[in-house]
Image (tube, rainbow, N blue to C red):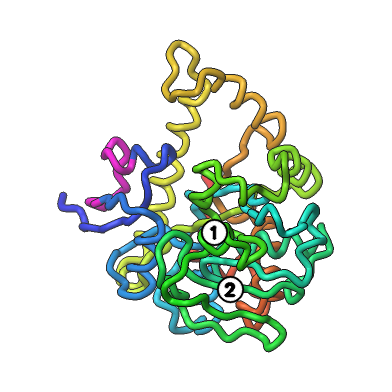
Amino acid sequence: MSRIPLTLACWDYDRTQALADGSVRPDGLDLTYLCLPVEETFFRMLRHREFDAAEMSLGSYVTNLAADPDGTAFVAIPVFPSRAFRHNGIYIHSGSGIEKPADLVGRTVGVPEYQLTAVVWIRGILADHHDVPVSSVKYRTGGMHQPGRVEKQALNLPPEIDIAPIAPDRTLADMLVTGEIDALYAPRMPRPLLEGRPEVRRLFADPRAVEEQYAAETGIFPIMHVVVVRRDVYEARPWVAQSLFAAFEQAKALTESRMSETAANRYMLPWQYDEVERTRRVLGPDFWPYGLERNRATLEVFLRYAHEQGLTARRLAPDELFARETLESYVI
């Protein structure tokens, strides 16, 4: 029987490897897996709708959906290929005098884009847990390592948000080194820190300890990316959403089964066995769940943050985000 061709743009994750190499095949679909950097995937999908399905920034998807819920170009499935704690993504100029989170109040902070999911989480966590209100910081946007980055989508932010682009020939990484910005919130590590430049350091000296404490207190492992299907593809064949969801679940299960292998190290991590055991002690045995219900509480927090930060005119509910076919299953 012939299969329906479908292009999926997604990065090179262990939990999607089986989809990329074809060992897991979505029912009814002939999948072409395009392995692209996440920034390229997001830009091309949001601007040009190039792919049938793609991973997408949760922040960008939520912003797009809230702006036009009836005409949005995408429908998501509850698959989360990227999750990450983000306390480690707060970088400061070493001479800024910033020693603790509250010292960020009144400072100038660089962000690649205001709507980035990692940045939404950082602002929300700082506001909720460290007394740094979202509007207490001046935001400057632009490329981290290349000049000229702009927001992928138009934003309609409240007037209390002080936001402006940096000069078109400058980068946030360089401005952090010179002290022209006091701090940087970003999902990628700035190059000066990788190079060992003394002008740049993390806000939290031991971010893992802070992140593990946050996880223990909140039960949250922040979601970064979701998978979306282009609406015209979904409306023509609604079964595509469920087929993709099941395939992503199967691919992730294969990776989970390999993680505890000790006969030979699959990755260049000498103590991988210990890392897996430690992670399960901190986050529980099913620490990377797909599906709505197991992620409802985390999504509710993110959607509150998106609304409080001016990205959505109203607070969305988690159920609004996903194709209805993926929210329930048959029972025998």
* Local SS, label 2: strand
Three-letter amino acid code at the position of disc 1: Leu
Residue in the picture at 70% in, 42% down: 207
Estimate the x, y position of residue 104 in percent, counting from the top left: 76, 64
Check if residue 28 falls in the magenta segment.
yes
Residue situated furthest top in the rendering: 263
Residue in the picture at 65% in, 79% down: 310
Residue in the picture at 33% in, 43% down: 19
Residue 227 falls in which quadrant of the image? bottom left
Rendered view: 5 above or below 215: below
Q: Which residues are magenta?
A: 19-32
Determine if residue 28 is in view: no
Residue 327: which numbered mark, if any?
1
The answer to whether 109 appears left or right of 3 in the picture is: right
Residue 141: which numbered mark, if any?
none
The answer to whether 61 appears left or right of 39 in the picture is: right
Rendered view: 277 above or below 227: above
Estimate the x, y position of residue 137 in percent, counting from the top left: 72, 72
Determine if residue 42 is in view: yes
Q: How many marks?
A: 2
Estimate the x, y position of residue 70 in percent, counting from the top left: 48, 83
Of pointers 1 and 2, the one earlier in the residue sequence: 2
Comparing 111 with 324, the one in front is 111
Rendered view: 332 above or below 130: above
Label 2 neighbour load within 10 Å: few <14, some 14-19, many 20+ = many
The answer to whether 180 appears left or right of 153 in the picture is: right
* Local SS, label 1: loop
Estimate the x, y position of residue 73 in percent, counting from the top left: 40, 76
Residue situated furthest bottom in the rendering: 159
Comparing 204 with 39, the one in front is 204
Residue 140: which numbered mark, if any?
2
